[in-house]
Amino acid sequence: MLDPDPKVQVVALSELSELVGHQNSIYEATAPAVVYVAGILAHPAAMNLRPYRNVPIRAALLNWLASMAYDASDEIVDHTEQYFPGFLTRSGKLAAFRDLRPMLYRAVAPFLEDSHEDVREAAGVAALVLAEHPGLAQHRDHLAVHARRILDTGSGELNRRVARKALEAWGHDVTGIEPFQEDSGDCGPHSDGRGDLEPPF
């Protein structure tokens, strides 16, 4: 994953998105993959710039973790349960992944004040999604500051939507913050995979 060869980085990040996170599903490989990614976030090589973009690899890894966490979030589970009652109970892989959220939060939290804007925002979005876990409730007031920052300076509507919904769910005043248009096909953070790693032409 942190191989200095840009081609290796492209393939590794692409496979995370296309194989481990294919069709926004949680697989047997998802939990081991996220544990590995969480473990390498602090590696110095994670601050290497991504091929063809002036953004650290760490930001891409955090975006991927946010995407995986969103695919196992309460919002997605509740939506799925409407059509497949008992889905969470029957899906051992999903439940096991959701149990990892406190550990993943501990890996993400050190980057909430990172010096690089893209890393800060990616860590903030990941932390907001992970913090819906009941065991992380004590962090929500602190994370509200990061949610407001994402709303003010976030790089995309999907990230700002996550921030607004977190504030709303945690009882913060969102008066004056326009609700973002719901789109069932694109309502949470997403890993950008290979596309943002290949030459921009």
Image (spheres, rainbow, N blue to C red):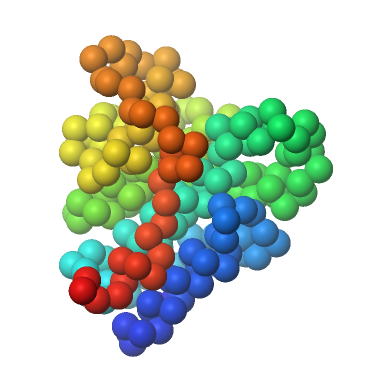
Count of all numbered marks drawn on residues in the image: 0
Rendered view: 24 above or below 82: below
Q: Is residue 125 left or right of residue 22?
A: left
- State the image coordinates of residue 106 (x, y, percent, origin top left): 47, 48
- State the image coordinates of residue 117 (x, y, percent, origin top left): 20, 51
Q: Quadrant of the C terminus?
A: bottom left
Rendered view: 13 above or below 60: below
Residue at the spot 35% in from the left edge and 49% down from the top edge:
123
Residue at the spot 35% in from the left edge and 40% down from the top edge:
158
- State the image coordinates of residue 143 (x, y, percent, origin top left): 36, 32
Q: Quadrant of residue 101?
A: top right
Q: Is residue 62 left or right of residue 70?
A: left
Rendered view: 25 above or below 8: above
- State the image coordinates of residue 127 (x, y, percent, origin top left): 42, 42
Rendered view: 195 above or below 181: below
Q: Quadrant of the N terminus?
A: bottom left
Please say whether residue 115 is visible from this viewpoint. Answer: yes
Please say whether residue 39 is visible from this viewpoint. Answer: no
